[in-house]
Image: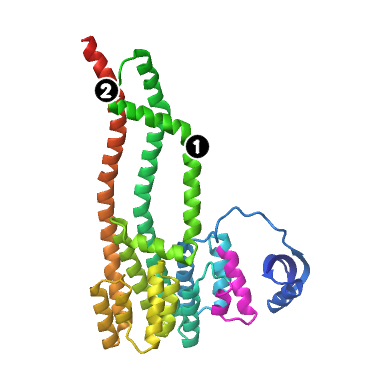
Amino acid sequence: MAFFIYLGVTSSGGQVKGEIQANSRDEVISLLRKKKIRTISIKKKPMSLSLSFGSGIKLSDVSRFTRQLSAMAAAGLPLVQCLDTLSGQTENKVLGKTVQQISIDIQGGNTLADALTKHPKIFNTLFSNMVAAGEASGNLDGVLTRLAGYLEKADSLRRKIKGAMTYPIVVGCVALGATIIMLTFIVPTFAQMFKDFGGNLPAPTKIILGLSNFVRAYLVHMAIAGVGIGFVISRYYKTPKGRYRIDDIKLHLPIFGDLERKSSISRFAQTLSTLLSSGITILDAIAITAKTAGNAVLERGLLRTSEKITGGQTIAEPLKETGVFPPMVIQMIAVGEKTGGLAEMLGKISEFYQEEVDAAVDALTSIIEPIMLVVIGIIVGGILVAMYLPMFEIIGTVG
C-alpha cells in the first residue's frame, strides 16, 4: 500500500486536503466517496528516507491510545468518530497515521479487529484477538478497558526491568572506559618516567605496563572483535535454536536469572488471565500467550501444554514439566481449574509476581551497586598502586 495526497470538495462545498493510504488511485476515490468527498486531484506521496528503527511507537503510546479509545467507546461515541478524533490528538505521528488508516478500513467495511491485523508491528496478535472477542460479544468497550489495563501493567513491568538492567550496564561501561583511558594515556607517562630512572620494576608494575602495551597495540582489533562477537550473537539469537539456548541461559544466571523468571511468570499470568476474562477459549488463549511470552523456553512449554490439553490433560501438569514455574504457581493454577476460577487465580498470580519483581529489582540494585563500586575501586586502585610502587622504592632508596 502507498500513501496518496488528495485535494477534494466536501458535500458542503468546502475544500479539504489530506493524506490517505491505499493500493491504487481508484481505491482512494472509492474511500473518499464513502466519506462524501469529491476528488479534485490525487498525487502519490514521494518516498522519503526514514532513519527511525522499528515502528517508532512505544508500548506506552499504544496503552494510552487504548485507554482513550475505551473511554470514548464507553461514552457511546461511534467507533469511526473515536478513531478520527484520536488520530488527530495522538502525539506520536506514526500512530496517528495508523489510526487514521484503521478508521478508513472500518468505513470500507472491515471490522476493527480486521483493520488492526493489518498493522501487526503495532497491534499484536493478543490485541487483535481480544478486540475480535469484544466485537463478537458486544462488549468492546469493556474489553478495551481490560486491554488498556493490561498494556499499562506490561509497560510498567518492562520499564522496571529495563531500569534494573540499565544501571549495571552504564556503570560497567564507565568502568571499562576509565580503565582503557588509564592504560592508554596515563600508564605510558609513568612508563617513560620509569625508563628514565632505570632499575628493576616490581612485578605488579611490570604486569600493568605489559597490559598497557597490549591494549595500545590491539585496542582497535579488540573493538572490532567485540563488535563481531556481538553481531554473531545477535544473528544466532534470531534463529529458533539460538533464541531457546540464550533464553534458557538467561533463566539460570546467578543474579539476573531470578528477575527474568519472575517477570516471565508475571507476564504469562497477566496475559492468560486477560485473554480468558475477555472470552477467548483456553487453547487460543494459550497459543496467543505463547507468542507474547518473551522467552523461548516458556513459549515452547506453552505450545506443548496446548498440545497436551488437546489430548485431555489439565493445564497444571504440562506447565510443571516446563521447569519454569515454581510449585506454588502450579498448585494455584490447579486450584483455579478445579474451582472454575482460573482467570481470577491467574490474576492473583500476576499481582503477586509483580510485587516479587519490584522486590527483585530493589534487591538487584542494592546488590549490584556495592559490587560495581568494589570492582571499580579494585581496578583503578590496583593500577594506581602498581604505578606508585616504583616511586616508593626510589624514595626509600634515596632516604
Q: Nearer the viewer, residue 272 or 178?
A: 178
Q: Main secondary structure of the magenta part?
A: helix
The reply to whether dot 1 and dot 2 touch (C-beta < 8 Å) is: no
Q: Which residues are magenta?
A: 95-118
Under circle 1, the secondary element is helix
Residue drawn at x 74%, y 64% as measured from the top left:
44
Residue drawn at x 55%, y 74% as measured from the top left:
116
* Amino acid type, residue under disc 1 in the picture: Val
Position above or below: 304 against 205:
below
Q: CA distance from mark 1 to mark 2?
A: 30 Å
| Residue 85 falls inside the magenta stretch | no
Residue named by callout 1: 220
- Whole-percent x, y for residue 178 in the image: 38, 35
- Whole-percent x, y for residue 298 in the image: 37, 71
How has the structure been colored for display?
rainbow
Q: Residue furthest front?
A: 200
Q: Residue furthest right?
A: 40
Query: Image quarter for residue 312?
Result: bottom left
* Amino acid type, residue under disc 2 in the picture: Leu
Position of the N terminus, as image quadrant, is bottom right
Position of the C terminus, as image quadrant, is top left
Rendered image: mark on residue 389: 2
